[in-house]
Image (spheres, rainbow, N blue to C red):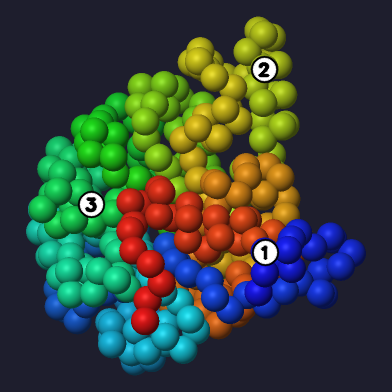
Amino acid sequence: MSRSSEEFVAQDDRAAAPVVRDLRVIAVEEHMSTEEFLRVAHGVDVAPGDEVEVDLLRTLERDPDLRTRLTDIGARLCEMDALGQDMALLSLNPPGVQAFPAADAVPLARLFNDALAEIVRRRPDRFGGLGTVTPQDPVAAAEEIERVMGPLGLNGIMINSHTGGRYLDEPEFGPLLAAAEANRAPIYLHPRAPSMPVYRDYGMPGAIWGYQAEAGLHAMRLILSGTLDRYPDLTIVLGHLGEGIPYWLRRIDNRHAFATRTIGAATPMPRLSLTPSEYFHRNMVITTSGIDDPDVLELALRAVGQDAIMFAIDYPYEDPAAAVTFLREAPLSGDQRTAIAHRTAERVFGITGTRSG
C-alpha cells in the first residue's frame, strides 16, 4: 500500500480507513507468568488489606484456560503469528509481588525476572520484558532494577500502582526512583485495585472504574508532588490511553494555576518548575491497552501526539485479534500508525530489530 493511500482519514470518512498488512507490530502490556512462580506465589501470605484482590487473581490464575494463556509461551507465539504481531513486551500478571511481605517478595521478584530474561534470551526477535520489583523494600527494588537493566537485559519495569496504600511520590521510594532514572528504566505504572475502600462496591475495584482511577491518581501524585522535578529523566508509561489524564490536561493546568495564585484555594502544594501538562508531555507516554475506540485515540493524538502513544493489547484480558485489527484499520496517517505500532516502543524501551518471520 502506498504512503498516499494511507493519509489521515477524516472523521466523517472512517469507514473507508485502509487496512494495513505490512506493519511491524509491538504490543507493550502483555502479561504472563510461569508455573514455578504461580506454585510459589500461591503459597505466600498476603499483606493485610490486599486479600480480596489477591484471592480474585489467584482464582483467575487457577482457571485452566487463563493459566495456559499466561504460561504457555509456545502457544502465545502461534497466536502472535496468526495475528501478524511481531513482538510482545512481557510482564508479570498483576499485582505482581507487591501484595506480599518483603521477605517473600524479594526472592519471588528475582525468580520471575530470571525466568523472563531466559524467555527473552531465547527469542529476542519476538519478546522483550518488563521486570518486576518490590516497592515494599525500596533498596532491594533499586538493586533489582540494576540487575533487570544490566545483566538480565530487559527493557524496563512494571509497578502495579500503590504498595500497601503507599505511592511512589513518598520519600521512602527515593532509592527506587533514583535507580530507575540512573539505569534509564521506563516505569510502566499499571493499575491495581484502589487502596481506598470507597471503590470496593458495585464491581468498581477492577477495570470497570477503579483501575483507571487508581493509576490516574498515582500519576497525578507524581506530577503535583514535585517528584518529577527531583527525577526529571524518569519515563512513566500509562495504559488505557493515559488513564483519563490527557483529556483533563487543560483544566488541570488552569485549576493548578488558580490554586497556586489564590491563597486557600487548595491544600498545601509544592512549587513546581513546570505546569502539570508540561510534566505529562516530558515524562509520560501512553498506550492503547484496552481502548479500541477511534474517537478516544483521535483525542489522545491531539492531546499528546503520535510519538507519545504505543500499541498494547493487555493480554490475556483483552481480545488480541480485536486490538490488532483496530491498530491496522484505525483512521490514521501512515506516520501515525507506524509510530503507534512500533516506533515509539522501540525508542522508549530500547527495542531493536525488524519485522519477524
Which of the image's four quarters has the C terminus?
bottom left
Quadrant in the picture for residue 323: bottom right
Q: Which residue is nearer to you in this view: 166 or 9?
A: 9
Badge number at residue 257:
2
Q: Residue at x 29, y 44 (%)?
A: 185
Secondary structure at badge 1 equals loop
Which kind of residue does numbered mark 3 sit on? Answer: Val
Where does residue 237 sit, x and y in percent of width and height? 45, 48
Q: Nearer the viewer, residue 335 or 316?
A: 335
- Count of numbered labels shown in the rendering: 3
Q: Which residue is rendered at x = 65% and y = 74% of the image?
A: 1
Residue at the right extreme of this rendering: 12
Q: Are marks 3 and 2 in contact (CB under 8 Å)?
A: no
Q: Residue at x 63, y 56 (%)?
A: 336
**What residue is shown with label 1?**
3
**In the drawing, does residue 157 fall left or right of residue 215?**
left
- Local SS, label 3: loop
Residue at the spot of label 3: 133
Quarter of the image for residue 57 reads bottom left
Q: Earlier in the sequence, mark 3 or mark 1?
A: 1
In the rendered view, does 33 fall on the left or right side of 251?
left
Is label 1 in contact with label 2 (beta carbons under 8 Å)? Answer: no
Residue 251 shows in this picture? yes
Disc 2 crowd rating (10 Å Cα; few below 14, some 14-19, many 20+) is few
User: Earlier along the polypeptide chain: callout 1 or callout 2?
Assistant: 1
Q: Is residue 66 visible?
A: no
Which mark is nearer the camera, 1 or 2? 1
